[in-house]
Image: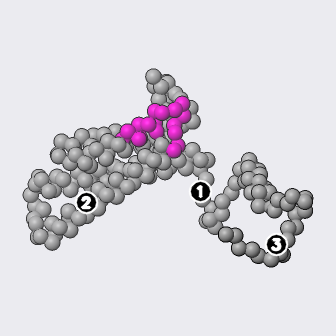
Amino acid sequence: MQWIAGEAMVPLGSEGLLQQLRPWHLGVILGILLESVLLCVRFWMGDTHGSMLMFVIVMVGLLALLLDNNYDVSYFKYFGIMSFISGSLDMSIVIESVVKSVRAHDSWTQPLSPATVLVVVHLACSVVQLASAVFCYLVCRDAEGGEEPDSDGGIFATTEEARIYGTALMQTQNRRSPAPDAAGSVDSKAFVGPAYKLP
């Protein structure tokens, strides 16, 4: 059995596994493990919809880690986006619950009231998912060479991409050039004869 580490597969029992893993790879792995535990807690508490959403997110994260010989950046992007959205939704539930309890003048002095436990679980889910999204961003940035987008918003293409773009542009321009008519001339003139109406 092998485990993913950076750009290459490393056997699970090798000496340098922890040295080869970047801190954000460990963060993603830890995030997936914590999300797995929290989805079980949510399911046990009766929040089946939230736990099923977290289950889908965890599965995408596992696909990102275990799918290919190297980690799959596109699945890390999917996992990060889904974690960010789900974490934001959980944070909105926390904010909504706190605002409702303040409006209703509920007392938060009861340490283990069901409402308090539910808010704490949603807050923990939100924090773990948002942290996983940040770690996924760091993994994707590292996989793409650590390049930050240019502040001008300019897009830089490699020579291979520029060559392909130039070829596609030339083909598009060739298609738009006027085709020669039957006589072989490119300059066609409009019909100058009298107009007839067909029956």
Q: Is residue 169 left or right of residue 126?
A: right
The mark that comes first in sequence, 3 or 1, is 1
Q: Secondary structure at mark 3?
A: loop
Q: Say which residue label 1 marks.
A: 148
Q: Position of residue 58 (x, y in %)?
A: 36, 41
Please determine whether, in this image, residue 98 is positioned above or below residue 73.
below
Circle nearer the viewer, 3 or 2: 3
Which quarter of the picture shows residue 189?
bottom right
The mark that comes first in sequence, 2 or 1, is 2
Q: Amino acid at mark 1?
A: Glu
Disc assigned to residue 93: 2
Q: Residues within 10 Å of mark 2 (few under 14, many from 20)?
A: some
Q: Residue furthest front?
A: 199
Q: Position of residue 112 (x, y in %)?
A: 11, 52
The part of the chain drawn in magenta is 58-74
- Asked if residue 185 shows in the view, the reply is yes
What secondary structure do most residues of the magenta stretch adopt? Answer: helix
Residue positioned 55% across, 50% down in the render? 141
Q: Is residue 98 left or right of residue 110?
A: right
Q: Residues within 10 Å of mark 1 (few under 14, many from 20)?
A: few
The mark that comes first in sequence, 3 or 2, is 2
Q: Position of residue 131 (x, y in %)?
A: 39, 51
Q: Amino acid at mark 2?
A: Ile
Q: Say which residue label 3 marks.
A: 191
* Residue at mark 2 to residue at mark 1: CA–CA distance: 33 Å
Q: Secondary structure at mark 2?
A: helix
Please determine whether, in this image, residue 188 is positioned above or below residue 55.
below
